[in-house]
């Protein structure tokens, strides 16, 4: 066997094993190889094991200096393209106003929609690039990026075009999602808006291949189950994957809809109850939790511990956005999931790698196995647990994507 490159000096090579989402107790099962090496050819992994067991040849080698290696992190939920800021909302919230009250008064998401609509595509691109760069430096080698601050079909498409341009400028893998985020302020306009989304926006996005999935926000102040059903049905008819923002502030049937329709993931889940835990555990839908929201808004954290104990497959994302989670680090999201959502270190790593990949419908990343793309992180220390232990500093020393060090 001949490799283009052999990575040596790995104190611990740590990964989940086997394709598919890891549910419940399986989220604690990690394969740890000490004194390990990785052989890479044509950007993919052709061998892993103990360094002493390598018997092939390598055209080049890199010694990482007795440091731990883990799979590249997957961030399955971001809103990285926006203009303006939400500092006034932050002041209002720290003065006692709720997120829902700010939204109802025209702030929150609506404030960002106005600012984003006023920006050019070049301005949005220049604003988004450093955000993606920060996620990449924190270990995210694959990142989902949503639209959702466009509101009209034309501006939503413009946002997706920005994401497309952004993908061409970063070595990270970006997956674009069309997000149906917030309804018109007038209830009389809602039916027309839903029709426009289903008959104009989704077909155009699918035709131009501007997104891989459609997401919709289901809450009392956002869309309701009957509206979301129409949107998700349209997405599926146009061969787009589907997912949901739901159970962030209220339980109004969004999670049940998601499970019934077989969505890739239901995201947020801060208000998820016992019956819903069991429903998720019995399904193939990934439960994506977003601890940055709980930290920033001061709301109860999603029941990560209970989700795992019930047998669900849990993923973790940053929810990077200007209003409820200005979190620019995928590694920090995992560290917060341990502290706020009750995950173990092992569960957090699985949630941020293989399960997060499954939340995006990906099977070729999130693990370090033969035949998969060589996306991995070299950590600063020799013990992989520093990835979720460290707060404030960056535990990631090197980011490798497709077998190349950034």
Image: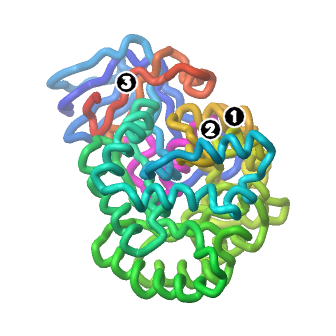
Element marked by disc 1: helix
Quarter of the view holding residue 301: top right
186 left or right, relative to 78: right
* Labels 2 & 3 near each other (Cβ < 8 A): no
The residue under label 1 is 338
The answer to whether any part of residue 368 appears in the image is: no
> Which mark is first along the chain, 1 or 3?
1
> Which mark is first along the chain, 3 or 2?
2
Circle 1 residues within 10 Å: few <14, some 14–19, many ≥20:
many
The answer to whether any part of residue 363 appears in the image is: yes
* Labels 1 & 2 near each other (Cβ < 8 A): yes
The residue under label 2 is 348
Residue extending furthest toward the right? 274
Q: Please determine whether, in this image, residue 138 is positioned above or below residue 151.
A: above
Quarter of the view holding residue 120: bottom left
Q: Position of residue 405 (x, y in %)?
A: 28, 28
> Which mark is first along the chain, 2 or 1?
1
Element marked by disc 2: helix
Along the line of sight, the residue nearer the viewer: 64 or 371 = 64
Q: Position of residue 373 (x, y in %)?
A: 32, 44
Circle 2 residues within 10 Å: few <14, some 14–19, many ≥20:
many
Along the line of sight, the residue nearer the viewer: 99 or 339 = 99
Residue beneath the point at 30% across and 57% down: 164
Indicate yes or no whether the magenta region holds residue 349: yes
The residue under label 3 is 398
Indicate yes or no whether the magenta region holds residue 358: yes
Residue beneath the point at 66% across and 77% down: 260
Real-space Cα distance between discs 3 and 1?
A: 23 Å
Element marked by disc 3: strand
Q: Which residues are magenta?
A: 346-369
Q: Position of residue 150 (x, y in %)?
A: 45, 65
């Amino acid at each position: 066997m001949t490799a283009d490159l052999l990575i040596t000096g790995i104190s611990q090579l740590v990964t989940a094993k086997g394709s598919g989402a890891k549910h419940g107790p399986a989220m604690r099962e990690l394969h740890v190889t000490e004194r390990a090496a990785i052989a890479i050819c044509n950007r993919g992994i052709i061998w892993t094991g103990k360094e002493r067991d390598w018997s092939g040849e390598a055209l080049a080698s890199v010694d990482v200096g007795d440091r731990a290696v883990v799979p590249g992190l997957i961030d399955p939920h971001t809103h990285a393209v926006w203009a303006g800021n939400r500092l006034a909302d932050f002041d209002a919230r720290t003065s006692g106003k709720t997120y829902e009250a700010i939204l109802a008064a025209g702030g929150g998401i609506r404030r960002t929609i106005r600012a984003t609509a006023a920006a050019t595509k070049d301005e949005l691109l220049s604003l988004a690039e450093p955000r993606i760069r920060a996620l990449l430096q924190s270990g995210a080698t694959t990142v989902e990026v949503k639209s959702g601050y466009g509101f009209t079909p034309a501006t939503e498409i413009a946002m997706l075009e920005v994401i497309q341009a952004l993908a061409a400028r970063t070595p990270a893998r970006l997956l674009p999602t069309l997000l149906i985020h917030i309804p018109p302020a007038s209830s009389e306009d809602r039916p027309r808006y839903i029709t426009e989304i289903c008959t104009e926006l989704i077909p155009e996005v699918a035709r131009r291949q501007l997104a891989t999935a459609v997401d919709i926000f289901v809450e009392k102040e956002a869309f309701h189950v009957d509206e979301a059903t129409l949107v998700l049905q349209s997405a599926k008819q146009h061969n787009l994957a589907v997912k949901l923002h739901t159970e962030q502030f209220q339980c109004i049937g969004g999670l049940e809809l998601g499970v019934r329709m077989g969505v890739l993931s239901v995201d947020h889940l801060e208000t998820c109850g016992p019956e819903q835990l069991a429903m998720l555990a019995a399904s193939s839908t990934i439960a994506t939790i977003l601890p940055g929201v709980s930290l920033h808004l001061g709301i109860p954290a999603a029941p990560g511990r209970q989700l795992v104990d019930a047998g669900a497959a849990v993923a973790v994302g940053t929810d990077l956005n200007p209003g409820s989670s200005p979190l620019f680090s995928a590694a920090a999201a995992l560290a917060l999931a341990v502290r706020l959502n009750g995950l173990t270190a092992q569960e957090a790593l699985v949630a941020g790698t293989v399960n997060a990949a499954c939340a995006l419908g990906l099977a070729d990343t999130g693990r370090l196995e033969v035949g998969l793309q060589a996306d991995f992180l070299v950590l600063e220390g020799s013990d992989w647990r520093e990835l979720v232990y460290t707060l404030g500093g960056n535990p990631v020393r090197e980011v490798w994507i497709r077998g190349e060090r950034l």
